[in-house]
Amino acid sequence: MGALGLLRPDARVELIEGEVVDMAPIGPDHVGTVNYLNAVLASRLAGRAIVQVQGPVRLSDFTEPEPDVLVLLPRDDYYRSRHAEPGDVVLAIEVAKTSLRYDRNVKLPLFARAGISETWVVDLGGDAIVVATGPRSWGYEHVRVARRGDSLEVLGVEVDVELVLGDEVDDPTVA
């Protein structure tokens, strides 16, 4: 739509069930959290996964959200020939402050229906990470809340919740 001139080239939108939806503006805490997750995951998963930041995942002909971070199965072409699809996604991560309700009530069910096995919603305002697994047609079967002091795991890599949520960060290149 941007190429056709229907949207501004810099428009922050997603295609959700056939509707073009404006994305919430992002603040420094959002950007910093996405940058931190990218640094940690990209360095620790190098060679085993591709970490994609704010790029699309094609869930259907009518739904193409842009999660903040995707951990994808490796592909020789680095997804140059097509967008990621649900079967490529190891983990989808949304970072939320003002968009928390939308991410939990709209995006999580979409990811579950598409079969994305695990989704995290980093709740910056609530100081927690919602972890959803066990996708079903109606949503995720298992939803838990990880807080400071907890750790999460993706492809054998441990991620400290404190460091994702906190003001202090470690060196992301150290396991």
Image (cartoon, rainbow, N blue to C red):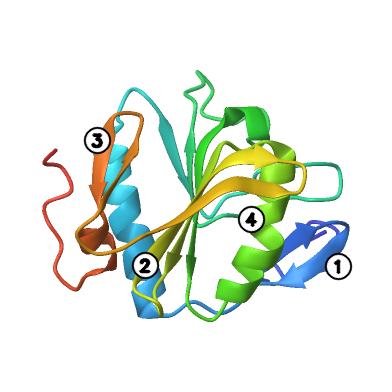
Of 165 and 133, which appears nearest the observer? 133
* Residue at x-position 21% and y-position 60%: 163
For the C terminus, which image quadrant?
A: top left
Q: Nearer the viewer, mark 4 or mark 3?
A: 4
Which badge, 2 or 1, comes first in the chain's sequence?
Answer: 1
* Mark 2 vs 1: CB contact within 8 A: no
Q: Secondary structure at mark 3?
A: helix
Q: The disc labelled 4 sits on which kind of residue?
A: Leu
Find residue 34 and report its horizontal and vertical position in percent: 38, 60
Give neighbour class at mark 1: few <14, some 14-19, many 20+ (Cα, 10 Å): few
Residue at label 2?
A: 128
* Residue at x-position 58% and y-position 75%: 99
Query: Which image quadrant is residue 67 in?
Result: bottom right
Find residue 168 and report its horizontal and vertical position in percent: 14, 68
Which badge, 1 or 4, comes first in the chain's sequence?
Answer: 1
Which badge, 3 or 2, comes first in the chain's sequence?
Answer: 3
CA distance for labels 2 and 1: 38 Å
* Residue at x-position 39% and y-position 74%: 124
CA distance for labels 4 and 3: 26 Å
Q: Secondary structure at mark 1?
A: loop
Residue at label 1?
A: 6
CA distance for labels 3 and 2: 22 Å
Residue at label 4?
A: 108
Find residue 156 and report its horizontal and vertical position in percent: 29, 29
Find residue 53 and report its horizontal and vertical position in percent: 47, 51
